[in-house]
Amino acid sequence: MKRLVGIALAACMTVAPAAGAQDYQREQRWADQILPSLVVGDAVTIKSPGRRDFLGLYTGTRGPKAAVLLVHGTGVHPDHGVTGVLRASLAEAGLTTLSIQMPVAGAVAKVEDYYPALFPDAVERIRAGARWLAEKGHPRIVLLSHSMGSWMSNVYYEQTANPPFAAWICMGLTGGFGEMGNVKVPVLDLYGEHDLAPVLRADWRRRFTLGSIDGSKQVKIAGADHHYIGREKEL
């Protein structure tokens, strides 16, 4: 399975990236690095209509309460850092998880290399991930995003009229929420006590926005930084 996924990804990631463009070769290098040592879950190929296929890490559980779609941050892979920890620990807690490879720019890319150039593909990948889980028979799907992935998820909501998610767990959003008119489900805004300055400066803006969304709340994880290192259990 893992070898076949690697071959499929390699076949669609052969174009060298231009400056500031999406780096498919970097995605392939991530896949080459993580697939041979993958312990939890299975590597799957997610189809995205009109776009390139991409990698997902799927961990199924018996009789799950829900399925969680995980969206990672800038320039990493679906098993990296806190996203990798959560995809495994949530599965241990009885939740099915699918962590997807989000678009990445070059290794020295800046934030402006991601937005707006890579966001259309990011939105489509979130849609494709949700569709993949639904086709697997999961009626209740939760979106969980971190850092740049939370920004991408916010734009996904702005551009998606009827999102299929039952809730959104938004971690480390570096700023306030954008347009939230399409968000009709509870949102949990999570951040660390020692998070990045833009995350901390905008906590009141996010809290104000959540006041108009039923069932939503904001939680600060004591002692945590942007990546929740050493605070994974509390998270």
Image (tube, rainbow, N blue to C red):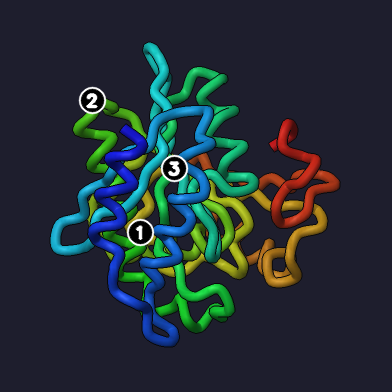
Distance from Cα at disc 3 to Cα at disc 2: 17 Å
| On-image quarter of the C terminus | top right
Q: Which mark is on residue 99? A: 3
**What residue do we see at 53% from left, 44% from top?**
79
Which of the two marks, 3 or 2, is nearer to us in this view?
A: 3
Which of the two marks, 1 or 3, is nearer to us in this view?
A: 3
**What residue do we see at 33% from left, 47% from top?**
6
Q: Which residue is mark 1?
A: 157
What amino acid is found at the position of numbered circle 2 in the picture?
Gly
Q: Which mark is on residue 189? A: none
Which quarter of the figure has residue 115? Answer: bottom left
Distance from Cα at disc 1 to Cα at disc 3: 18 Å
Which quarter of the figure has residue 175? Answer: bottom right
Kind of element beneath mark 1: helix
Q: Which residue is mark 2?
A: 137
Q: Position of residue 234 (x, y in %)?
A: 74, 34
